[in-house]
Image (tube, rainbow, N blue to C red):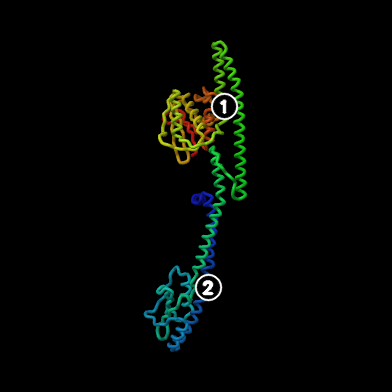
Amino acid sequence: MSFRLKSILPRGLYGRTLLILIVPIVTIQLVVSIAFIQRHFERVTLQMTGGIAVELRLVLDRMAAGDRAGAEMVASELGFGLGTAAPPLEGLRYDALDLSGRVVAETLRDEVPGFLGADLTRESGRVIADFATPDGPVRVVIDRRRTSATNPHQLLVLMIVTSAVMTLISYLFLRNQIAPIKRLAQAAEAFGKGQHIPYRPRGATEVRAAGAAFLDMRARIERSIESRTRMLSGVSHDLRTPLTRLKLGLSMLPEDDETDALLGDVAEMQRLVDEFLAFARGDATEETEAVDLPALLRRVADNAERGGQRVELRGCDGSVTLRLRPQAVTRAIENLLSNAARFGTRARLSLLVGERSARIVVEDDGPGIPMERRDEAVQPFARLDGARDPNRGGGVGLGLSIAADVARSHGGALRLGESEDLGGLKAELALAR
């Protein structure tokens, strides 16, 4: 029962808050309508019809005494229509939706002697009742306005209109209060995707406090990233300077096997430093921009083919525009392609676009990574013992880590699996739209 109730309840804050407002209003209307309107107007109808019954008994007593002329005169003065009933009515007739009609008919039946029947449906605004007299059945026509209140609906209409107006006012006020929450959610979601949109705290005190806390958190994260980037830039400069001196010094030595080995070590150190800096920096300082993703993938595939790698391209014919950091995404795809080239002979680059995400899939025909080691493979500096070790020929093993970091900075994730067609590793880079 609880599961069914949750499935039909609104999921958004707008809908749930409006439900909290509307349900009590509707409940109050129903309670007031049943407990007050119906009972109140039934009692009013009972009192008014009781007075009519007294007047009818006076008219019928005159007729029972044989004074028909006097009875007609009294009926005329009291506003009754008096005539002969042919044929007489039997029973009570009233509309089911006529809440006071039942009270009128039953009161006439119970309080007026000789009652034969009553019809409240034959003539609009009239009550027709037949009574037995010594001269035969008599028909009395009574104005309905004298038997019951004529405006019971006015209170109900007033309640409905007032409730609708108050609900509209509540909705407008609620929208103004929820709008800052939605803007805060949008700013937080954009920041999770690596985007920076302007945000200023507004709304209630609690919402303003949450907005201010978010701005402080965002500022601290940005300052931390900026400080790390500056520090790493300095480290990069300090490391590359002695490496350059080593290269220069080694180039001046006689060429032999030992010198070539030392030059190879220096080149390896240079590549390790560049890869580590790329991972630590994560291109967080790069601004996001609108990029045609298929065009970017085509450029990456062309560059890989010029480098001698076989890349099969799929799903990149159309145009899909996303806001992303192009250099970071390019570096992540190039790392995945270079990883595929290192352990396989074929590589496939595919683009799958959904409503909420765009998935870039890189597949190869290499040995792959065992399922139980895939989570470990995306960790920085991981050492795998299997055939598919990302550290083998790949420096410090940061290629998959860089791709995973880029995916997270764009609100997505990097998922590793097995290629169904090629049989090797399937790396899926998901980017939020």
Secondary structure beneath dot 2 equals helix
Q: Quadrant of residue 119?
A: bottom left
Of badges 2 and 1, the one in the foreground is: 1
Q: Residue at x 42, y 86 (%)?
A: 134
Q: Residues within 10 Å of mark 1 (few under 14, many from 20)?
A: many
* Mark 2 and mark 1 residues within 8 Å of each other at the beta carbon: no
Res. 369 visible in picture: no
Res. 242 visible in picture: yes
The spot of residue 243 in percent (x, y) is 59, 20
Q: Residue at x 52, y 49 (%)?
A: 12
Q: Which residue is mark 2?
A: 43
Q: Which residue is mark 1?
A: 276
Q: Residue at x 45, y 70 (%)?
A: 98
The spot of residue 79 in percent (x, y) is 46, 81
- N-terminal of the two: label 2 or label 1? 2
Q: Where 126 sits versus 155, above or below? A: below
Viewer-nearest residue: 186 or 360: 186
Q: Amino acid at mark 1?
A: Phe
